Amino acid sequence: MSESKTFSLPVIGEVNRRTAIKAGAATLGLAAWAVAIKPWFEWTGELDTSDFLQKHYRELAPEELQVILNRLTDEARKETGKPVVVKDHKPIPGVSFAYALNLSICIGCRRCVEACHVENNHDRPSHQSYIRVFEMDKGGINFEKGDATYDHPVPAKDKYYMPVQCQQCENPPCVSACPIEATWQESDGIVVVDYNWCIGCRYCEAACPYHARRFNWSKPEVPPAEVNPNQSYLSNRIRPQGVIEKCTFCLHRTREGKLPACLEACPTGARVFGNVLDPDSEIRWVLDNKRVFVLKEELGTKPRFYYFFDK
Amino acid sequence: MKATGVVNYVRFLRRSLHVATDGGWVFYAWMFVLSAIALVGANAWAVQVRDGMIRTNMTDHVSWGLYIANFTFCVGLAAGGVMMVVPAYLYHDREMHDVVIIGEILAIAAIIMSTLSVVVDLGRPDRFWHLIPGIGKFNWPISMLTWDIIVLNGYLLINLHVVGYLLYTRYQGRTPNPKWYVPFVFLSIMWAISIHTVTAFLYCGLGGRPFWNTALLAPRFLASAFVSGPAFILLVMRVVRVGSDLPMQPGPARLLVQIIRVAAVVNLLMLASELFTLFYTGGAHLASARYLFFGDHGKYGLVAWIWSAIAMNLIGTALFFTPAALRRSTTRVVACVLCVVGIWIEKGMGLIIPGFIPSTLHEIVEYAPSLTEWKVTAGIWALGLLLLTAMLKVAVSVFTNRMSESESAPDSSSRAT
Amino acid sequence: MTARIVINAPRSSALLVWFAGWLMVISGAGCGRPPTGTEAVGGTLPDHEDGVQAWPVTIRKPEHPPAISMGAFDGQGRPLTIACATCHATKPPNAEARIGTPLTQFHHQMVGRHGDLSCTSCHNPAEGYASLRLADGKSVPYREVMMLCAQCHGPQYRDYQHGAHGGMTGYWDLSKGGRARNNCVDCHDAHTPKYPTVAPARGPNDRFQTGDRHE
């Protein structure tokens, strides 16, 4: 039974003690709530409305995209003090990229890992990179015995080295997984992510069989002096917190005809890249003349990253 | 002066709010503690949004953790309500019909908990609108996540409608019109099966995760949902019986125990089948199970969890088979708690996490939830229990005729000792 | 031009230019051994029949034969070096000296590991070691040392020509830019060609990664 000791309050009028206490408690609760979720507003306060309302990359008109690129360029310049330019690179028609890796001459030096780290403006504290190099036992392709954390002079005896990065699959499970089409495959085969569309659910990261995707668990930290100023919307601009990213075959370079950074860094020349539709390309020669294989072929992902041995 | 329908409904909602926040000191203590935990969780989540998910212990190797584990379990909890609906409506069990609303209310709370568990797992919750079909870009029917969003929201709406309709008509003192709720009830039976099947499909369709990539995953999910759901409902029914004066017959609970008996055995059989196929064949598929049950490469993070879960499930199942479980007894409560906790562990730490360990390239990076994750999850549970309590309060008030439209006197709170 | 004779696939612009470039071009600025080259000598590029100008592929080449450093400097501060012929013009060639023999005088204690080759299998005694020679005795200038490597290491040379060995920097699309490639001897010391062991760059710094130290 409710206590019915009532008393009079201005404006509210007759109210009993129970109700008054409940009202007081509710007010305190609301105040506590406001304090509790204050950090949320510190976060949303840093976003602006145009960020929030931005459409998907594939639905942007060229002028709208240019406005966004200009804004990203300005923000990057302000943050780094460097003459950053954020461009958009569309696929070259008639080009389908493929990559091959010669396991006989890869020595596991990780220069490719380092080059990717620098070229793509990766987070420094985690020394992030899209490439992981596995030291494998000769005599098989057994990842259970593979080790990506080796720290001794390479190449070690009876080991070979297998760098793994995004395979830009022809049948990518990550693209099927994404609930909002934030990731898709472009006409030259590169699977890209719209960093301004991704909600960070990480379903694609769960779906990828090759450990190719990376999530921005925090805002990437890159010292301004080390920032690579040649940036592209879909590839190496500094990604926002809370979104997924992945190897883009350096599309900001390759869609201008250049070699990807990992290939340029490789001292032994284990990496081969090019347009598989060009019958005279180096990659075509490798695919036609070397015994190439792909990882996890049985999954039906149809990677466009091939491995081969010389003998 | 006759008020219009809308005004009546608003008054019903206001009175429901009043009833839901009124009670004895135990009730207030319970709600206060839950609110406090919910606030702690909300704060932890806000900090996580600001600082990034680095506040969790998830990594690129184990990219889903406690949040998705909890999500998986809560979906099962929601699906469990169907085990009351089927006897009540398909088999016309009169006694069950009287209490089926408890299962439907639990379904609402559980769906909200599971949806929240996903929201807190998003890296960019500020971009939620990207998910809205028509406004964002909804990758349906290809992405299983889109199916999950549809079925979970649909199930929520169905149950909200059914519960709301039944409560409101009872409040108004009139008999509910079958055409406004029976079709939805039948829909909810199919839909309940679908929510947990689709959730299982999220995982079992991924070829890169062999631990999940089994046809048996969806049936296993359903079997364990039909244990954990009814077990949780039994606990709720016990609280309602003890804490209110709603008349509760022993029949429905007994029926639920019998359902749990079957479902628990099926669940264990499926688990055994899974384990045999993994361990007998061996090979790379075994890696996750080996890490889970026995540890691998010197890492044993989940071994204690899974064996506790197995023990709890076995003991709980055994207790359910005792005659004492069919009576109103402590045995029954203990069995329920053991099964609920055991299945929470097994579905969460025993299924989601091992899917990521070893990683797709066979690296073993371990995972244990961070304090932030525990706080947020506790906050979600607290909020769910808050909603559950509030809805049950209203339902009990309505069904004990304490809250009805015809009464002009202000509602007195139900006696909640 | 040789390139045009060799190429019989008119549409293969990339390959065409690749061969043309290889034959025509220039040494980059070398570093250390083999002896540094001088600046590039530009070559004219045959236009592709479609009219697409293709960019060159430049290959570093040793400009002239190696010379022994005296450790002293001349009046202008340039290092004093001695050509091979200074001593070897007056000594009879020793066909018995093999690559494993330590050279205790004047050759900086050089010891090689390259099979069981004799020194004269590569170094041409007929020209006072101012050039190299193939197995059939044909003289090969130091600039073309790759021909010497290729005569035995055909598979690697073939791979090199097709971009599958030795690396490159520049453009995959030669209609947009050129490429630069190393010479065999840039990576493989001719006397000890085995690729050296190196310290790897830093691996990833993952949270909770304790490595896979398996038994």
Image (cartoon, rainbow, N blue to C red):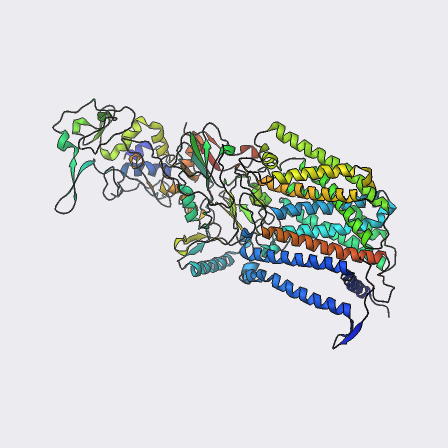
Name the side, left or right, on which A152 lies relative to C119: right
Asked if one can make out residue A280 in the rendered structure from this viewpoint, the answer is no
Quadrant, the C terminus of chain B = bottom right
Q: Residue furthest top?
A: C96
Name the side, left or right, on which B410 lies relative to B297: right
Q: Residue at coordinates 68% horizontally, 67% vertically from top-left?
A: A27
Give the camera-side residue of A98 and A224: A224
Quadrant, the N terminus of chain B = bottom right
Q: Residue at coordinates 78% horizontally, 46% vertically from top-left?
A: B234
Q: Residue at coordinates 62% horizontally, 31% vertically from top-left?
A: B278
Name the side, left or right, on which B181 lies relative to A114: right
Give the camera-side residue of A23 and A96: A23
Q: Position of residue C79 (x, y in %)?
A: 17, 43
Q: Residue furthest bottom?
A: A10
Q: Position of residue B280 (x, y in %)?
A: 62, 27
- Snapshot quadrant of residue B132: bottom right
User: Vertical placement of A29 versus A260: above or below?
Assistant: below
Asked if one can make out residue A57 in the rendered structure from this viewpoint, the answer is yes
Q: Residue at coordinates 41% horizontally, 31% vertically from top-left?
A: A104
Q: Position of residue B366 (x, y in %)?
A: 55, 42
User: Vertical placement of C42 versus B406: above or below?
Assistant: above
User: Vertical placement of C65 versus B383: above or below?
Assistant: above
Count of all numbered marks drawn on residues in the image: 0
Q: Position of residue A64 (x, y in %)?
A: 51, 58
